Amino acid sequence: MQPFHYKALPIDVHFGVGKSAEAKDILWQQGYHKVLIITTPGQKEAGHKLAKQLQDICAGVYPHAVMHVPVAVADKAVAFVKDHDIDCCLALGGGSTIGLAKAIALKTQLPIVAIPTTYAGSEMTTIYGLTEDNLKTTGRDSHVLPKVVIYDPELNLTLPAQISACSGMNGMAHAVEALYAQDKNPIVSLMAIESIKALKSALPVIVKDLTNISARQKATYGAWLAGVCLGSVGMAIHHKICHTLGGAFNLPHAQAHAITLAYSVHYNRNADSEAMDRLAEALGVSSREEVGIAIYRLNESLGIELALKDIGLPTEGPAQVARIVCDSPYYNPREYHYDELKALLQKAYKGLPPV
Ligand code: NAD
């Protein structure tokens, strides 16, 4: 066994169907009495429902979170919490909402309580992102890590099939890359395998029956574990590709992750044989040669859009992405080869299987 370092992040996690009903008690126990609920405009109603539950400890609903946390949106929110003497931001939503709460925490050091409603995993990380002039910068800061996370699978019932599927595959991508991370360790690898299995079995049920609570529960569990993976170890080629697709081409985050994961793992299939054998087993295929095609077929069965061209990548995109990825690579267990990467991204562009 390789030597390793493992450090757990200090987050209180409450998990269970209906758990968000306990939010008031949980916030009270933490000593938060002037809580601002943050949502996207689309989840404003859910925010108001939660506000009713919190009664006197809720200072209002702030429904202005948008994708990629523009600096102007973050600055306005920071001014708002200062003007209203807020003592805690309660993020109710996906990565965009939690992202705005993190931007506030970064400037004010206000604590965050998160109630995630997608499978993106941001609630488990110290990573924040801010966008200005079309440029997204990310960083790490311990102040942006939520103090408490409440997972309530019931809140995911309203998440549409496409967003559920792509968001779930976004979560799976964190778990997959944790298996071959530079700083991988046995505990995180166990969580990664458990996460992949949970998401793989839950997502096909969810897209057929959005209100299947046991599948929602399993997917939320898988997404939590995937978030721990993302928050605990470094990511590799797949996250570099997706950050390029989002940053340089403004492609939607979860869909870009969902589509390209098959190609990333196919590229890495022989790079870390122990990790890839475990991945093959978790995906239910007999060899690591099949990990890419297994994920491609899973996407197909989930009804996920398969071609990058259909989510906004221009014709010259594959070559440009391959160039950017090779010129400023993240750690990867395998070297970067421009021609091979470009050829794979051209397949992803057209939605063809990786093999
Ligand atoms: P999102 O938060 O943008 O949500 C997508 C849409 O779904 C939104 O319109 C939202 O209102 C809606 N929605 C969310 N939950 C819903 C529900 N239960 N019912 C109905 N509608 C619902 O999408 P996301 O994929 O969760 O987050 C993407 C963002 O998160 C990206 O900007 C990405 O960079 C960031 N992210 C950050 C980290 C991190 O560690 N910092 C990790 C993962 C993702």
Image (cartoon, helix red, strand yellow):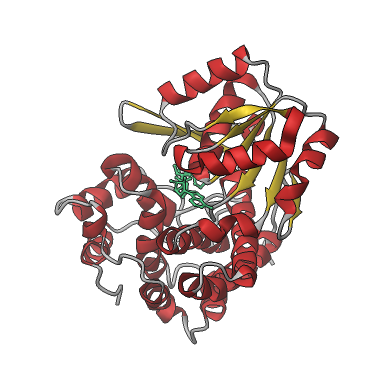
322 vs 149, left or right, is left
In-image side of 12 versus 252 (left or right): right
Q: Quadrant of the C terminus?
A: bottom left
Residue beneath the point at 39% across and 73% down: 292
Is residue 184 at least partly visible in the picture? no
Which residue lies most toward the top here? Answer: 83
Q: Residue at x 52, y 75 (%)?
A: 205
Of 317 and 183, which appears nearest the observer?
317
Asked whether 231 or 118 is in front, the reply is 118
- The spot of residue 291 in percent (x, y) is 44, 76
- The answer to whether residue 40 is left or right of residue 319 is right
Above-or-below relation of 216 to 14:
below
The residue lying furthest to the bottom in this view is: 286
Between 99 and 85, the residue placed more toward the observer is 85
Residue 164 image offset from top left, x and y in percent: 47, 61
Seen as rendered, the residue at the extreme right is: 29
